[in-house]
Image (cartoon, rainbow, N blue to C red):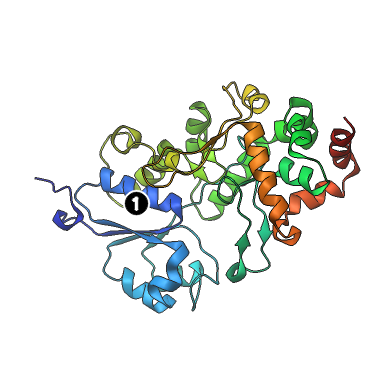
Amino acid sequence: MRGSEDGARTGPRIAVLGNCQARGVAQAMRLLAPNSPVRFVPMGSLKRDHGHIDGLLGTLAGDDHVFSQSFPGGLIPGGDITTLLAREPRTVLFPTIVFSAFHPDMVYAGRVEDLSALKLARSPLGQYHSAIALCAHRVGLTARQAEPLFREDVFRRLGYLDHWEPAVRELLGGAAAIGFGLEREMSRWARRGAFMHVINHPKAFVVGDLARRLLTGSGFSPEPVEIEDYLGDELARDVVWPVYPPIAETYGLTGSYLFKTKPRGEAFPTLYDLPGFLAASFAIYDAADPADLACARVEAWIDAPGIADVFREARNA
């Protein structure tokens, strides 16, 4: 008989190290490998939880399988993912899924001089910003003046409608670089439509495919079930950024301008339509130090006459 709690599981022990995607992979593995205890080791608190890379290695010593996303130096004293791979040869790398074609307007803003001092600016949707909104605010537009910029001809001028191929190359190239080719998975995911909630939050079936492949490659026989049928979609409970209608139409999808926040506790999430999202964003930007809203894409747009004209035209409309 199989136990449902990790304490009742007697199979090989599994550790999954990484970001919020890795947490989903760990959860999927608990379903797909029901005899194995599985634990998630969060990347964001490596220093706090383990102190030093030696402490992390000691923590992982009791596991039979270690699956990890890449992590840079600065998160934990003593090393990075290269150090972990050298000193813990059982570690199997898996990719971080970042795909921007469905949400090409989404950017981060803030002070990013070095990883340890990383300070991202907040937005109505956590740390995710609209590049159009940021740039519009930067050049002195109001939220109401920015709203008409969310249309097909502007998206075309900004390159938003030609984002698929670059996004695919980036995803497949990054995965291939760690020996985890995703060509077959990419074809399957694309057939299912928009497979991302935001640029770095894949849907449950993507996370499930990663978990299943890691388990199979390590000698497990995963249960033949779909993650969303048993566990739902954990990352759907976080922020959901819409696929704008002109972009959705490019991919044969249904789009919207409905933005969803991450709810607090059991509360229903806050929803913004486009005017509401822009008004909430501009209220934050008005109160912020401009230096805290730094964004490389916005800086590039302001220095590019063909793009800057788009925003100037909105001011004069």
Q: Tell me where residue 79 appears, x and y as whole percent.
A: 50, 75
* Badge 1 element: helix
65 relative to 49, above or below: above
Q: Quadrant of the C terminus?
A: top right
Q: Nearer the viewer, residue 137 or 221?
A: 137
Judge from the rendering whether residue 297 lies leftward or rightward of residue 223; answer left or right.
right
Judge from the rendering whether residue 286 lies leftward or rightward of residue 271; answer left or right.
right
Q: Quadrant of the N terminus?
A: top left
**Residue drawn at (33%, 68%) of the image:** 60
Label total for image: 1
293 relative to 73, above or below: above
- The amino acid pointed to by label 1 is Ala
Q: Quadrant of residue 249?
A: top right
Q: Tell me where residue 121 appears, x and y as whole percent.
A: 63, 56
**Residue drawn at (60%, 34%) of the image:** 102
Q: Tell me where residue 278 appears, x and y as whole percent.
A: 67, 39
Whether residue 83 is visible here, answered yes or no, is yes
Q: On the image, numbered disc 1 is attached to which residue?
A: 26
Whether residue 221 is visible here, answered yes or no, is no
Residue found at the very far left of the displayed protein: 1
Q: Nearer the viewer, residue 275 or 246?
A: 275
Judge from the rendering whether residue 212 lies leftward or rightward of residue 309; answer left or right.
left
Q: Tell me where residue 310 appears, x and y as whole percent.
A: 85, 36
Judge from the rendering whether residue 113 lies leftward or rightward of residue 116; answer left or right.
right
Disc 1 crowd rating (10 Å Cα; few below 14, some 14-19, many 20+) is many
Q: Nearer the viewer, residue 263 or 182?
A: 263
51 relative to 26, above or below: below
